[in-house]
Amino acid sequence: MHYTDSGGTSNEALVLLHAGIFANWFVPLDEQPVLADERRIQVIRTGYLNDPPATPMSIQDHVRESADLLRALGIDRVRLVAHSAGVVYALQMALDYPDLVTDLVLSEPPLINPLMPVEDHAAVGAVLGPVLGSAVQAAMRGDLAAAFDTAMTGLCGPDYPDAITAALGSAGLTQARANCGYFFTGEIPAVNQWHFDEELAQRIEQPVHLVGGGDSPPFTHNVISYLARILPNADSTYLIGQNHLLPLTAPAELARLVAAHSTRELALKSA
């Protein structure tokens, strides 16, 4: 795995867990001035810089690797910020390391069965199943550009190249396409084997703030409503005019939510 470490040497940190497909979703968030005083760790999961693991890794394996990294960096308290597939890792880390994780900001949770209300399973599968299936087939035959475009268009809409280029530059888009293979060959199988349910959700007692795009599809809003119901200490915010690309298109707004959530938790701790 890889990481960046910015903002100081505190033993408490803001840990950014990126979405799937490519690793640099949170680069614009990490650069926001409102977060400059916090120690910030961007975790880049094994596989995402063309460094595939020697043996398949489960979600728990990736989480353990991240926790070991944080210990090695002298960090013993973390606030997790996660987007899309990163939400899976954040929830698992809260379950496996409850004394490490203080609170979570979860943006645009992925449309996967463990996080969706049962009544949406069939409809989402009918919409996204063929898209991701086609993308995986393209990746397996070595056509990463087609895999990337198929998945990103299906999840984020056809304007995604403009959003990535505006946030990360043309080189960022090129790198994202080149490094997307592990998502299809390693991460999707790991997520498909991941288990989460209402009983496990009840064990996550840390404060959770769910963030969605106002223009995201109703299925995403349903996921957020469902998680807000089953997690013991959760609330939610929608960013008007945003969709699944919001860490790239609205990093300042997301950073303000993260900072406000931090301020709220500090107030509760001191009360």
Image (tube, rainbow, N blue to C red):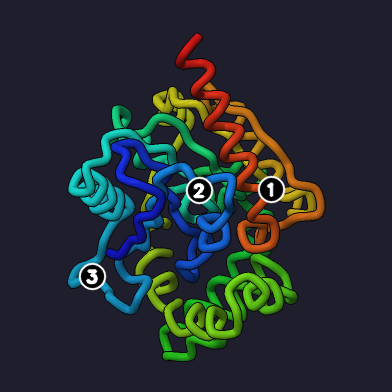
Judged by depth in the image, the label closer to the viewer, 3 or 2, is 2
Type of amino acid at the residue the image marks with label 2: Ala
Which of the labelled discs sits on residue 36, or is there none?
2
Which of the labelled discs sits on residue 53, or is there none?
3
Q: How many marks?
A: 3
Q: Secondary structure at mark 1?
A: helix
Judged by depth in the image, the label closer to the viewer, 1 or 3, is 1
Name the residue rendered at 38%, 52% in the picture: 41
Image height check: is 27 above or below 256? below
- Neighbor class of circle 2 (other Cα within 10 Å; few <14, some 14-19, many 20+) is few
Q: In the displayed structure, does residue 194 sit left or right of residue 227?
A: left
The image position of residue 210, as x and y in percent, is 60, 38
Q: Secondary structure at mark 2?
A: loop
Q: Quadrant of residue 251?
A: bottom right
Type of amino acid at the residue the image marks with label 3: Pro
Image height check: is 97 above or below 267? below
* Residue 213 appears in the picture as rendered: yes
Which of the labelled discs sits on residue 219, or is there none?
none
Name the quarter where the N terminus is drawn. bottom left
Judged by depth in the image, the label closer to the viewer, 2 or 1, is 2
Q: Mark 3 and mark 2: span between their CA atoms?
A: 33 Å
The image position of residue 255, as x and y in percent, is 60, 46
Type of amino acid at the residue the image marks with label 1: Glu
Q: In the displayed structure, does residue 13 sit left or right of residue 73?
A: right
Which residue is tagged 1?
253
